[in-house]
Amino acid sequence: MKLGDIAQRLQGRLDGDPNVDIVRVAGIEHAQPGDLTFVANTKYVGHLESTRASAVIVGPSVVVPPRTRAIIRCQDPYLAFAQAVSLFAQTVPPAEGVDALACVAPDVTLGDGVSVGPFAAVGPGVVVGARTVIYPSVVIGPGARIGTDCVLHARVSIRERVVLGDRVIVQDGAVVGSDGYGFVTQADKTHLKIPQHGDVYIEDDVEIGANTTIDRPAVGETRVKSGTKIDNLVQIGHGVTIGHRVRFAAQVGIAGSTIVEDDVLLAGQVGVAGHLTIGAGAIASAQTGIPNDVEAGAFVSGYPAIANREWLKSSAVYRRLPALKRRVAELEARLAQLEERLGVRSTAQAPTEEPSAE
């Protein structure tokens, strides 16, 4: 593809030869002649001196070394990079129709252009929208409804009566509509299972990562609203409501009946207790534990979650605790000696020596 055509598609300003042939998009450290690369983070600006790429996408104010071959200046270089990758993505869509090795119930409704791969099983009463792709070994339970232009990758399980909106992508091995974790402890200490027969709704333009699980409740619904992006190995408990445009990184866990409002960002391994509300636009850094409600727009870290700035200060102190402990012991000993010389009865007892490990 000609560089000039790419710049036009990206709505960027080209400084260089528009007739240069570009064959792929690559990272700046590994790019070769014929590649298009990008700089969205200032820490990579130094690589502009050494990159072999034929062209680089940069922001409007980045200073570029004279030797750089060609530049496409865009307002948002990372967004432009994503769009450029799409231009070069080579995907081979599966054949339309139902594979001979698939098992599709007689009363299933399939829209135009649907593809059902081998060993997929589609239960009775299922409705599948136009152009949806169902890859091999997908299982769709009775009464489920799948929207248009969805993609269900291999080994996905969509349980009974689950509803998926349009343009939903479900990555390999994810389970949508599995039983919520609900038990009652009986007098004899055994656990009686609470039947989980509530509904699960996944709205438009949601992506669900590989091996993620989204549970159904006993009553009511679990809902993931439009535009939300969920990474791999995420657990969403029964009765949870996830707002619009929410982003969850890998291994996030949301306990039952929690409400996550719009535009929340939870980094990797964040855990959220049940029956809470995470306010709109809140951010939690990696491995944060959230036992209480979080206000809208807050940035929290640590366990229990506190304001990120306070957590950073606390982390700095935590590293110094052994030295601080020794210093306090020394000061207490000196204070005791001073009080003894002055004949003052000490109100604080100097710490006793810790027992030797020898």
Image (cartoon, rainbow, N blue to C red):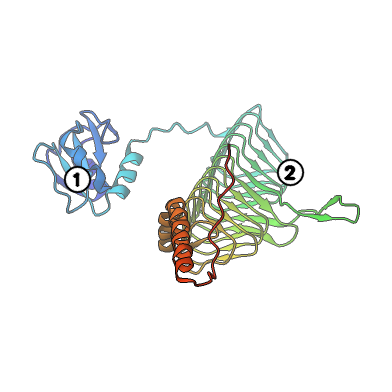
Q: Extreme right residue here?
A: 188
Determine contact: label 1, label 2, CB under 8 Å: no
Q: Secondary structure at mark 1?
A: strand
Q: Amino acid at mark 2?
A: Pro
Q: Is residue 9 visible?
A: no
State left or right for residue 232 relative to residue 64.
Answer: right
Front-most of residues 81 and 279:
279
How many other residues sit within 10 Å of disc 1, few (<14), some (14-19) or many (≥20)? many
How many other residues sit within 10 Å of disc 2, few (<14), some (14-19) or many (≥20)? some
* Residue 352 position within the rendered picture, expressed as x and y whole percent measured from the top left: 56, 54
State the image quarter where residue 2 is shown: top left
Label annotation for residue 338: none
Position of the C terminus, as image quadrant, is top right
* Residue 123 position within the rendered picture, expressed as x and y whole percent measured from the top left: 72, 41
Which of discs 1 and 2 lies nearer the camera? The answer is 1
Q: Earlier in the sequence, mark 1 or mark 2?
A: 1
Q: Extreme left residue here?
A: 66
Residue at the spot of label 2:
124
Q: Amino acid at mark 1?
A: Ile
Q: Is residue 157 above or below residue 177?
A: above
State left or right for residue 341 relative to residue 11.
Answer: right
Q: Is residue 112 visible?
A: yes
State the image quarter where residue 201 is shown: bottom right
State left or right for residue 20 relative to residue 183.
Answer: left
Residue sitting at 17 percent across and 50 percent down? 62
Residue at the spot of label 1:
72
